[in-house]
Protein backbone atom coordinates (compact mmCIF):
# COMPACT_ATOMS: atom_id res chain seq x y z
CA UNK A 1 0.00 0.00 0.00
CA UNK A 2 1.29 3.46 -0.85
CA UNK A 3 0.62 6.73 0.88
CA UNK A 4 0.88 10.33 -0.22
CA UNK A 5 0.96 13.62 1.65
CA UNK A 6 -2.82 13.70 1.21
CA UNK A 7 -3.04 10.84 3.73
CA UNK A 8 -0.11 11.73 6.00
CA UNK A 9 1.08 15.06 7.40
CA UNK A 10 4.78 14.80 6.47
CA UNK A 11 6.86 14.79 3.29
CA UNK A 12 9.58 12.19 2.79
CA UNK A 13 12.63 13.85 1.23
CA UNK A 14 15.82 12.28 -0.15
CA UNK A 15 19.08 14.21 -0.55
CA UNK A 16 22.02 12.06 -1.56
CA UNK A 17 25.19 11.84 -3.63
CA UNK A 18 25.63 9.10 -6.21
CA UNK A 19 28.30 8.07 -8.70
CA UNK A 20 27.40 8.27 -12.37
CA UNK A 21 27.03 4.47 -12.39
CA UNK A 22 24.49 4.57 -9.57
CA UNK A 23 26.39 3.81 -6.35
CA UNK A 24 26.13 5.70 -3.05
CA UNK A 25 29.18 4.03 -1.47
CA UNK A 26 31.86 1.45 -2.20
CA UNK A 27 31.14 -2.10 -0.97
CA UNK A 28 32.85 -1.28 2.36
CA UNK A 29 30.95 2.00 2.76
CA UNK A 30 33.90 4.20 1.75
CA UNK A 31 32.93 7.66 0.39
CA UNK A 32 36.13 9.56 -0.46
CA UNK A 33 35.28 9.43 -4.18
CA UNK A 34 32.38 11.79 -3.26
CA UNK A 35 33.66 13.72 -0.24
CA UNK A 36 37.31 14.20 -1.27
CA UNK A 37 37.64 13.74 -5.04
CA UNK A 38 40.87 14.43 -6.94
CA UNK A 39 41.05 17.99 -8.26
CA UNK A 40 40.23 18.44 -11.95
CA UNK A 41 38.61 21.01 -14.21
CA UNK A 42 34.91 20.98 -15.06
CA UNK A 43 32.99 22.97 -17.65
CA UNK A 44 30.28 25.37 -16.58
CA UNK A 45 26.84 24.13 -17.58
CA UNK A 46 25.12 26.45 -20.02
CA UNK A 47 21.54 26.80 -21.17
CA UNK A 48 20.77 24.93 -24.39
CA UNK A 49 19.35 26.40 -27.59
CA UNK A 50 15.97 24.91 -26.67
CA UNK A 51 16.04 26.34 -23.15
CA UNK A 52 17.92 29.65 -23.33
CA UNK A 53 16.68 30.76 -19.93
CA UNK A 54 18.39 29.29 -16.88
CA UNK A 55 16.31 26.46 -15.37
CA UNK A 56 15.23 26.41 -11.77
CA UNK A 57 18.13 25.16 -9.63
CA UNK A 58 18.08 21.92 -7.69
CA UNK A 59 18.22 21.97 -3.92
CA UNK A 60 21.63 22.18 -2.28
CA UNK A 61 22.48 21.21 1.28
CA UNK A 62 22.29 24.82 2.42
CA UNK A 63 18.74 25.14 1.10
CA UNK A 64 17.61 21.60 1.93
CA UNK A 65 18.77 20.87 5.48
CA UNK A 66 17.48 23.97 7.29
CA UNK A 67 13.92 23.09 6.21
CA UNK A 68 14.18 19.56 7.64
CA UNK A 69 12.72 18.91 11.10
CA UNK A 70 13.23 15.12 11.30
CA UNK A 71 15.71 12.56 9.99
CA UNK A 72 14.87 8.93 9.26
CA UNK A 73 18.08 6.93 8.79
CA UNK A 74 19.10 3.31 8.67
CA UNK A 75 21.42 1.62 11.14
CA UNK A 76 24.47 1.75 8.86
CA UNK A 77 24.01 5.48 8.32
CA UNK A 78 23.53 6.02 12.06
CA UNK A 79 26.74 4.12 12.86
CA UNK A 80 28.61 6.23 10.31
CA UNK A 81 27.22 9.45 11.79
CA UNK A 82 28.42 8.35 15.25
CA UNK A 83 31.99 8.82 13.99
CA UNK A 84 31.33 12.51 13.26
CA UNK A 85 32.38 15.12 15.80
CA UNK A 86 30.34 17.03 16.63
CA UNK A 87 26.94 15.35 16.21
CA UNK A 88 25.60 16.97 13.00
CA UNK A 89 21.88 16.82 13.78
CA UNK A 90 21.46 19.08 16.82
CA UNK A 91 17.97 20.52 16.91
CA UNK A 92 16.55 17.79 14.66
CA UNK A 93 14.57 14.72 15.70
CA UNK A 94 16.32 11.52 14.57
CA UNK A 95 14.64 8.15 14.02
CA UNK A 96 16.80 5.10 13.28
CA UNK A 97 15.11 2.28 11.37
CA UNK A 98 16.64 -0.97 12.64
CA UNK A 99 15.23 -4.29 13.77
CA UNK A 100 18.27 -5.09 15.92
CA UNK A 101 19.87 -1.86 17.15
CA UNK A 102 20.16 -1.55 20.91
CA UNK A 103 21.28 1.87 22.13
CA UNK A 104 20.87 4.25 25.05
CA UNK A 105 21.59 7.22 22.78
CA UNK A 106 19.00 9.79 23.87
CA UNK A 107 19.46 11.72 20.62
CA UNK A 108 17.65 9.04 18.61
CA UNK A 109 14.47 6.97 18.63
CA UNK A 110 14.69 3.43 17.25
CA UNK A 111 11.90 2.14 15.00
CA UNK A 112 11.81 -1.63 14.53
CA UNK A 113 9.82 -1.62 11.28
CA UNK A 114 8.72 0.65 8.47
CA UNK A 115 5.20 0.76 9.92
CA UNK A 116 6.54 1.77 13.34
CA UNK A 117 8.72 4.45 11.74
CA UNK A 118 5.73 5.83 9.85
CA UNK A 119 3.70 5.96 13.07
CA UNK A 120 6.48 7.67 15.02
CA UNK A 121 6.85 10.35 12.33
CA UNK A 122 3.12 11.02 12.27
CA UNK A 123 2.63 10.92 16.06
CA UNK A 124 5.53 13.33 16.66
CA UNK A 125 4.24 15.90 14.18
CA UNK A 126 7.02 15.59 11.60
CA UNK A 127 6.62 17.81 8.54
CA UNK A 128 9.74 17.45 6.36
CA UNK A 129 11.56 14.17 6.87
CA UNK A 130 15.06 13.62 5.50
CA UNK A 131 15.22 9.91 4.59
CA UNK A 132 18.82 8.70 4.30
CA UNK A 133 20.58 5.38 3.78
CA UNK A 134 20.32 3.13 0.74
CA UNK A 135 18.08 0.38 2.13
CA UNK A 136 15.93 2.89 4.02
CA UNK A 137 15.41 5.00 0.91
CA UNK A 138 14.55 1.88 -1.10
CA UNK A 139 12.00 0.70 1.48
CA UNK A 140 10.31 4.09 1.82
CA UNK A 141 10.24 4.61 -1.94
CA UNK A 142 8.65 1.19 -2.51
CA UNK A 143 6.03 2.02 0.15
CA UNK A 144 5.14 5.35 -1.47
CA UNK A 145 6.60 7.39 1.40
CA UNK A 146 9.04 9.50 -0.62
CA UNK A 147 7.77 12.77 -2.11
CA UNK A 148 10.97 14.51 -3.18
CA UNK A 149 14.34 13.26 -4.42
CA UNK A 150 17.49 15.35 -4.81
CA UNK A 151 20.46 13.50 -6.29
CA UNK A 152 23.92 14.98 -6.73
CA UNK A 153 25.60 12.97 -9.49
CA UNK A 154 29.37 12.81 -9.07
CA UNK A 155 31.63 12.72 -12.15
CA UNK A 156 33.10 9.31 -11.40
CA UNK A 157 32.46 5.64 -12.14
CA UNK A 158 33.34 3.38 -9.21
CA UNK A 159 32.25 0.09 -10.76
CA UNK A 160 30.76 -1.60 -7.71
CA UNK A 161 29.26 -0.79 -4.35
CA UNK A 162 25.97 -0.02 -2.67
CA UNK A 163 23.27 1.00 -5.11
CA UNK A 164 20.95 3.92 -4.47
CA UNK A 165 17.85 2.29 -5.93
CA UNK A 166 16.67 -1.31 -5.71
CA UNK A 167 14.02 -3.46 -7.37
CA UNK A 168 10.49 -2.06 -7.60
CA UNK A 169 7.21 -3.75 -8.44
CA UNK A 170 5.99 -0.68 -10.38
CA UNK A 171 7.31 2.36 -12.16
CA UNK A 172 7.87 5.45 -10.01
CA UNK A 173 7.25 8.57 -12.07
CA UNK A 174 9.20 11.74 -11.29
CA UNK A 175 8.65 15.37 -12.23
CA UNK A 176 11.73 17.53 -12.72
CA UNK A 177 11.71 20.49 -10.33
CA UNK A 178 15.21 21.86 -10.63
CA UNK A 179 18.65 21.14 -12.04
CA UNK A 180 22.06 22.74 -12.11
CA UNK A 181 25.75 21.84 -12.17
CA UNK A 182 28.48 23.18 -9.94
CA UNK A 183 31.79 23.66 -11.77
CA UNK A 184 33.99 23.52 -8.68
CA UNK A 185 33.19 19.83 -8.09
CA UNK A 186 31.49 18.77 -11.32
CA UNK A 187 28.36 17.61 -9.53
CA UNK A 188 25.12 17.62 -11.51
CA UNK A 189 22.36 18.30 -9.01
CA UNK A 190 18.79 17.30 -9.81
CA UNK A 191 15.62 17.68 -7.72
CA UNK A 192 12.49 15.71 -8.60
CA UNK A 193 9.00 15.53 -7.13
CA UNK A 194 7.66 11.98 -6.92
CA UNK A 195 4.33 11.54 -8.67
CA UNK A 196 1.93 9.65 -6.39
CA UNK A 197 0.99 6.21 -7.68
CA UNK A 198 -2.50 5.96 -9.14
CA UNK A 199 -4.60 3.62 -7.05
CA UNK A 200 -6.98 1.58 -9.19
CA UNK A 201 -10.62 0.73 -8.31
Image: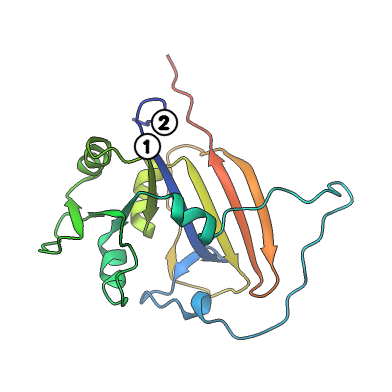
Residue at horizontal 31%, vertical 65%?
A: 77
Relative depth, front residue between 1 and 37: 37
Q: Quadrant of the N terminus?
A: top left
Instruction: Tell me if residue 60 can be seen.
Output: yes
Where residue 145 appears, as percent x and y from the top left, is 38, 39
Q: Secondary structure at mark 2?
A: loop
Q: Earlier in the sequence, mark 1 or mark 2?
A: 2
Direction from residue 81 to residue 16 in the image, left or right? right
Classed neighbour count for the residue bearing mark 2: other residues with Cα under 10 Å, few (<14), some (14–19), many (≥20): some
Q: Secondary structure at mark 1?
A: loop
Residue at horizontal 47%, vertical 37%?
A: 170
Where residue 13 appears, as percent x and y from the top left, is 44, 47
User: For mark 1, what is the residue?
Assistant: 10
Numbered-mark total:
2
User: Could you tell me if the residues under marks 1 and 2 are in contact, i.e. CB atoms within 8 Å?
Assistant: yes
Where residue 25 appears, as percent x and y from the top left, is 43, 71
Q: Which mark is residue 5?
A: 2
Residue at horizontal 52%, vertical 60%?
A: 62
Amino acid sequence: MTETTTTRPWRGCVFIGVSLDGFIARPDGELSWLTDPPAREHAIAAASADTPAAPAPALEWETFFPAIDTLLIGRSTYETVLTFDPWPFDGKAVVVLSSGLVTDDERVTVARSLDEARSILTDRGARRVYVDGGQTIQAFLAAGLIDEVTVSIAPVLIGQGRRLFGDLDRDVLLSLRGVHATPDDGLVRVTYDVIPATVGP
